[in-house]
Amino acid sequence: MWETLRNLFDEYMGTGLIVIFFVISLIYLWVQEKRKYIRILFVYVPVILLCLFFQPLFAKLVYNTAGREIYYRLLWLLPVTVTIAFAAVTLYLRLSGKRKIVFALAAAGMIMASGSFIYRNPYFQKAENFYHVPDCVVHICDAIVAPGREVMAVFPLELVQYVRQYEPTICMPYGREMTVESWYYFQSDLLNEMERDVINLDRLAPLAKEKGCHYIILSEDKKMNGSPEKYGWEVFERMDGYVIYRDTEIILEIPADHS
Amino acid sequence: MIAVKLLISAFYLLVMPVAAGSIFRVRESSRTGNLVFQWVGGQIFLWACFQLLCVPMILLEADFAWVRVCYSVFLALVMALAVVLRVRRKKKRVVAVTPIRGFDRKNAAGYILWVIFFALLLLQLVQAVRMTYRDGDDAFYVAVSSITQDAQTMYRKLPYTGFTTELDVRHGLAPFPIWIAYLAEMTDVRAVSMAHVILPVVLIAMTYGIFYLLGDVLIPEKEEGLPLFLIFTELLVLFGDYSFYTPENFMIARSRQGKAALGNIVIPMLWLLLLLLFRRLKQGKKIPLGYYVLFVATALTGCLCSTLGAMLICVLAGVAGLCAAIVYRRWKILIPLALCCLPNVCYTVLYFVLE
């Protein structure tokens, strides 16, 4: 258990420099800060919370009740950012003249060197529209959405997480749950067929039909074995590097008041 | 048209909270009785009321329309009360808002530091609109908001696929996405845009608002100390990509998710309230009722944001309360703190009973 908790803490604190800054700040405030109410909250409470985090019995209790994957959030109770900033400013205010400026610049530099710029994270990308989902998802959803009813469509895995954020009337036989290793990772025959390098229509088409898919969206780059027409598929539209097939054997009735 | 929608959004996210905050002013001193405190405190109060109103309706499997109507009526009442109180206070010549402390044009260094702070804040707000962080959890939380806005049902459809399901009690007890759906509905903005574009701007600004209030209490020298404190917090956030799990990372990358609001608004707000409480204890001053109202509201907001929030709030309040009781030898302080955490205990019990 100790090893697990230590790994969790290491993962949470990243490079480790922040932990060092935090501990130095705690010690500095413990020595310098005379106001009791600040010592309670910014020295005693963080230390007790850290002890609590590493307490195996408490960890087991939280593991069993809330789940082990979110135990690290107990560390959110530590006021790391505020404590470091507060200790740095306290020290800054004790200095005078040029030493003040040098300290402020050095502290800022050390903070910047301790981590990495958040917008350089590869998961950050320039938004393509006001919805913050890929343009291709917006275009495909707008093309297949049916007035007054839901439609069933199967998408390539790279798009599934965005579809229902943008258009909740489009249903899918599988969604984001298939992309998470600890959940239902690739536990769907339809998904496995959709993600093959070469699509085998003899296998994919019956599975899509079984799930009642009105539309099948495939990347234009995908090679295909078999003829889509044989299964009642027709090309509905091509856009943004994807082909939208409409399965004409799956009826798509538009309610009378919307047609 | 977009400008009108943004104006309506500003009304719900800026004007309404300030109005609500003006009712429950907890004026520790003139420093904290300012506009920022009213805004943050007001929003926390509104969130808490939303939680109280929404969860029973979710459990009763009522349509979203009920939440929309009831909460709108509640907001209208809050607004009316705020206007009446404002008029009364004006008659009594009570100054409701004090200016932001530390902003003094005569102090060149302080002025430069404030400019740097606002420039860095602006950068983060612009980036919140310009950049997108592709997080898988949005497929759940944002989809719940979109479904609620579209189908008018709450937690009765699987967000990943759209299939109808039995009530999702676990998530239904923390209906932050429903609040987003409410805003989307009232502003006529798609829930996906509300969650990804408009809300991050407001919630990031609110986090710095709380940091400002914390700095205001912590730092005696305001002219340089306060803006420098805020700049350091900004740098720690901006260069906080050393870990995927920190609240700072959640704030920039996933601010639309309830757990991000828990880590960056609710928990820091609780730190602020504890700070104000312990300072009053030290000074031997009486704790105003409004303070406890705000404390309970913060605890309830923790439940709104995340089911884990209920527990985290209790842990922090418990540990801090025990420390203060020992240091000040004032054991009685534990009673009101325990009572303030009672709603969280109820939600936790409810969670285990319904699960």
Image (cartoon, coloured by chain):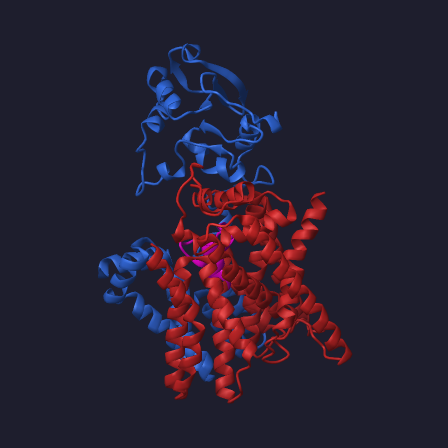
Chain colours: A blue, B red
Relative placement, left or right, of A184 versus B94 is left
Of the 4 image quadrants, the one containing the C terminus of chain B is bottom left
Identify whether B172 is placed above or below B288. Answer: above
Residue visible at 40% across and 70% down in the picture: B316
A151 or B140, which is in the foreground? Answer: A151
Identify whether B138 is placed above or below A249. Answer: below
> Does the stretch in magenta take in B263?
yes
Residue visible at 37% across and 39% down in the picture: A177
B67 or B39, which is in the foreground? Answer: B67
Is residue B186 visible in the rendered structure shown here? yes
Q: Position of residue B254 (x, y in %)?
A: 49, 50
> Does the stretch in magenta take in B142?
no
Q: Which residues are magenta?
A: B240-265
Identify whether B225 is placed above or below A250. Answer: below
Is residue A109 visible in the rendered structure shown here? no
Residue visible at 36% across and 57% down in the picture: A12
Of the 4 image quadrants, the one containing the N terminus of chain B is top right
Identify whether A230 is placed above or below B27. Answer: above
Q: Position of residue A34 (x, y in %)?
A: 46, 84
Q: Quadrant of residue B37?
A: bottom right
B38 or B185, which is in the foreground? Answer: B185
